[in-house]
Image: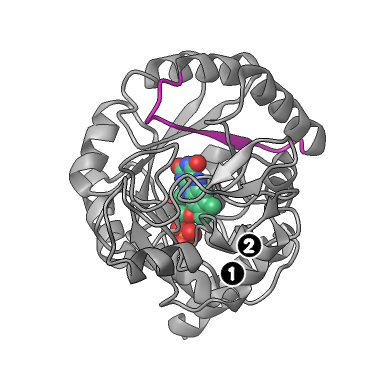
């Protein structure tokens, strides 16, 4: 199952791992399985970023992408990516225009997440090579208010022939087939890959995803310590329930603000309402942290190797499309 974008990106299957973690092993596993692996560069130090890129390169000879969130200036990290030979760079949450020329000058391609056809047109005018249309049902930080089903065809029509990747709710072959039917050239898959063996997140987080259904998430600005005012979708947990029971008070008067709920293996503390998600090695009230998940979480039924997810997505999508054609 190939689309023209697969050729552009140098991948075999129209499956992109969304930047859900800083893990090189997960990114490499997806790339080795024929999809496009990717990791978050946004919060790594320049040296940490360099190290993670080298680690990924030691684990795969295939292409992978690195993501930068433009809520903060990222020129220094982008320079590291390009120095280290990364040629696929994705941006989220900001104007990619100041960053595109450096990537192109290095011979690279830019992917940028959008939440409307208008934003997609602006991204393309800035030189972006492919747009990621992120629907409202997506897990993690979500800017828009339009569902994937309505957004993707609007973006496809708005920027054709620039390729569009669909994000939000793609978690099995049926939803991947639907995204392709809407005109997307690949699926950008987040929540499904959090529940994989290689994802460097806490096991309790993975278990909670497996146990959750489509009504178990909330899009809110509740988990905002470290990233103010940015809506994100996460599982409803004890922190959300306590806040609701208190009448949904604003920042500054939410129950338990400032309480330490967990500690990372490196020793730093995570407070209630922090934007940090539970990483492997953290200890404490893991359940009370921001456990990001999209509404497609209902389709996550097991924790499996990332390669099995890529294979399952492609095989099922192929079957669904063949059944529909007949
Ligand atoms: C745990 C988690 C962390 C995420 N972190 C980022 C990030 O750093 N940068 C980014 O562009 N998107 C991030 N996202 C959003 C994804 O890129 C993507 O839009 C979303 O996961 C797609 O929806 P889905 O979760 O239903 O597959 C994150 C999503 C999750 C679930």
153 on left or right of 58: left
* Image quarter hosting the N terminus: bottom right
Q: Which mark is residue 209?
A: 1
Query: Could you tell me how far apart the alpha carbons at marks 1 and 2 are, in whole angstroms?
Result: 6 Å
Q: Position of residue 316 (x, y in %)?
A: 59, 75
Numbered tag placed on residue 81 in the rendering: none
Q: What residue occupies the far left of the structure in this picture?
A: 118
**Residue matched to label 2:** 205
The quarter holding residue 220 reads bottom left
Q: From what the image shows, is residue 80 above or below residue 289?
A: above
Q: Tell me if residue 188 can be seen.
A: no
Determine if the magenta segment contains residue 130: no
In the rendered view, would you say 290 is above or below 83?
below
Q: Is residue 61 magenta?
A: yes
Highlighted magenta segment, given as a residue range: 60-74
Q: Which is nearer the eye, 246 or 97? A: 246
Image: 120 above or below 223: above
Question: Left or right: 81 with respect to 218?
Answer: right
The residue sitting at 60% across, 67% down in the picture is: 313
Q: Are marks 1 and 2 in contact (CB under 8 Å)?
A: yes
Q: Secondary structure at mark 1?
A: helix
Foreground residue among 232 and 150 = 232
Q: Assess mark 2: CB under 8 A from ligand 1? A: no
Q: Residue at x 28, y 26 (%)?
A: 126
Q: How many marks?
A: 2
Q: Is residue 29 left or right of residue 250?
A: right
Name the one closer to the observer, 205 or 27. 205
């Amino acid at each position: 199952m190939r689309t023209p974008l697969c050729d552009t990106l140098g991948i075999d299957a129209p499956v992109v791992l969304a930047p859900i973690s800083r893990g090189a092993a997960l990114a490499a596993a997806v790339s080795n399985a024929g999809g496009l692996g990717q990791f978050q560069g946004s919060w790594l130090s320049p040296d940490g970023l360099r190290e993670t890129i080298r680690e990924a390169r030691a684990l795969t000879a295939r292409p992978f992408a690195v993501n930068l969130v433009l809520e903060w200036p990222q020129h220094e990290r982008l320079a590291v990516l390009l120095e280290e030979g990364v040629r696929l760079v994705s941006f989220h949450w900001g104007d990619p225009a100041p960053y595109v020329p450096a990537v192109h000058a290095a011979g690279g391609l830019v992917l940028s997440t959008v939440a409307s056809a208008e934003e997609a047109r602006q991204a393309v005018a800035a030189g972006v090579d492919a747009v990621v249309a992120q629907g409202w049902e997506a897990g993690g930080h979500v800017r828009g208010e339009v569902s994937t089903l309505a957004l993707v065809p609007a973006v496809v029509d708005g920027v054709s022939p620039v390729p569009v990747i669909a994000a939000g709710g793609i978690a099995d072959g049926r939803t991947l087939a639907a995204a392709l039917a809407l005109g997307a050239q690949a699926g950008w898959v987040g929540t499904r890959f959090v529940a994989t063996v290689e994802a460097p997140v806490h096991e309790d987080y993975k278990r909670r995803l497996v146990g959750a259904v489509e009504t178990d998430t909330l899009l809110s600005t509740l988990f905002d310590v470290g990233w103010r005012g940015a809506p994100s979708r996460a599982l409803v947990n004890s922190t959300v329930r306590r806040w609701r029971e208190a009448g949904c008070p604003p920042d500054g008067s939410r129950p338990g603000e400032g309480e330490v709920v967990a500690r990372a293996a490196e020793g730093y503390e995570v407070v209630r309402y922090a934007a940090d998600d539970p990483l492997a090695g953290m200890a404490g009230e893991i359940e009370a942290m921001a456990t990001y998940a999209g509404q497609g979480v209902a389709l996550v039924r097991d924790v499996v190797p990332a390669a099995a997810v890529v294979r399952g997505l492609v095989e099922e999508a192929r079957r669904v499309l063949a059944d529909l054609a007949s």
